[in-house]
Amino acid sequence: MAETVRVALDAMGGDNAPGEIIKGALEALEASSQLSIILVGREEAIQKELAGKTYPADRLRIVNATEEISCDEAPVYAVRTKRDSSLVVAMTLVHKGEADAFVSAGSTGAILVGSVIYIKRIRGVERTPLAPLIPTEKGVSLLIDCGANVDAKPSQLVQFARMGSIYMEHVIGVKNPTVGLVNIGVEEEKGNQLVKDTYPLLKECKDINFVGSVEAREIPHGAADVIVCEAFVGNVILKLYEGLAKTLVSKIKEGMMSSFRGKIGGALAKPALKKTLKSFDSSEYGGAPMLGLNGLVVKTHGSAKAKEVKNSLLQCITFVDQHIEEKIREQLGGKEHGMGEDS
């Protein structure tokens, strides 16, 4: 029998909390009997959302937390002073071994800070990157890092490549995933100093399938399975991706409704178009895992609704089943300088 995966869910984090967060939790419980969820937040508000709903009571419990951390608060101060916030309490459950994973749509900064303070890095991991899946012509690619480590070092980008390769192979099922380094050209001598210093290190790395530099325009074509960059570049790529996808969908709908002929054509094309556009819906892929921690942390969009929350919870099952944390520990643990804070 498959092992139960226990996920601490920040019920109060995000623009649509607690309603959409709890709705997504119930949908995830219905989708998988392997999942057990701990809803962390104001118990009264959670009970109000659960009232009248049917769910497996043996796989859902509530842990009360009287405080919340908003996105406009200073992350370090908020995490250190709001010890009874839903975010901190949920992370503490992972730290204590009472949960296998933590999922939140709350403050990205607070999640990054809290992860390092409460869950801690695997020993040997220098930095813990956020790594969302992005749609491509060939399927999906892992963008690593997209927001956690601005001004990263070459050795850290190499670790991102190695952790990203583990994730793509064992969670997504891509054998011997290719790794590309984001650059302004494909020539080895191009790029800023970080890219120039990182390129030869990736070439020498024997446990990844490095294919060289990747220009941004090639990313949507699936130029590499793992797209490596520091967080500033990654976040720009991610936000442009999301904005462009929404704009294209809007313009396509506008074009279809602009004339009678367009409406007829749109009706005929709707089934195929719906399937294609679905692949560009970020909620289909769940949240962005934070790799290299002593436990799984998944950050969903602040505007996440039930479907994204559900998929974020379900992706935790594969992560735990495939022992990703252990694989990262085996490959990186203690092998690099800049040891982490393994507890």
Image: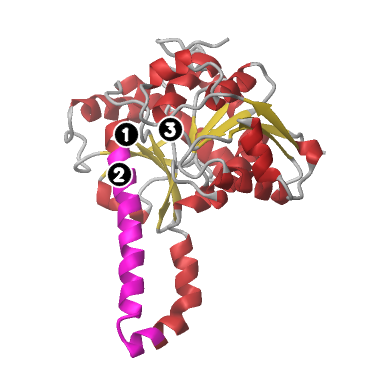
Of the two numbered discs 2 and 1 on the same chain, state the one appearing first in sequence: 1
**Label 1 with label 3: CB-CB less than 8 Å:** no
Identify the magenta region.
234-263
> In what quadrant of the picture does the N terminus appear?
top right
Q: Tag 2's secondary structure?
A: helix
Nearer to us of marks 1 and 3 is: 3
The residue at which mark 1 appears reads as: 229
Q: Dot 3 surroundings within 10 Å: few (below 14), some, or many (20 or more)? A: many
Q: Point out residue 14 in the picture as x, y percentages from the top left corner.
A: 47, 39
The answer to whether the residues at label 2 and label 1 have Cβ atoms under 8 Å apart is yes
| Amino acid type of the residue tagged 1 in the rendering | Cys
Residue sitting at x 53%, y 24%? 67
Q: Judge from the rendering whether residue 102 lies leftward or rightward of residue 290; answer left or right.
A: right
Q: Residue sitting at 30 percent across and 56 percent down? A: 244
SS for dot 3: loop
The C terminus sits in image quarter: top right
Look at the picture and state if 329 lies above or below 146: above
Q: Residue at x 79, y 40 (%)?
A: 57
Identify the disc placed on residue 237. 2
Indicate the amino acid at tag 3.
Leu
Viewer-nearest of discs 2 and 1: 2
Q: Residues within 10 Å of mark 1 (few under 14, many from 20)?
A: many
Image x and y of residue 163, in percent: 47, 29
CA–CA distance in space, label 1 to label 3:
11 Å
The local secondary structure at tag 1 comes to loop
234 shown above or below 221 = above
Identify residue for label 3. Answer: 130
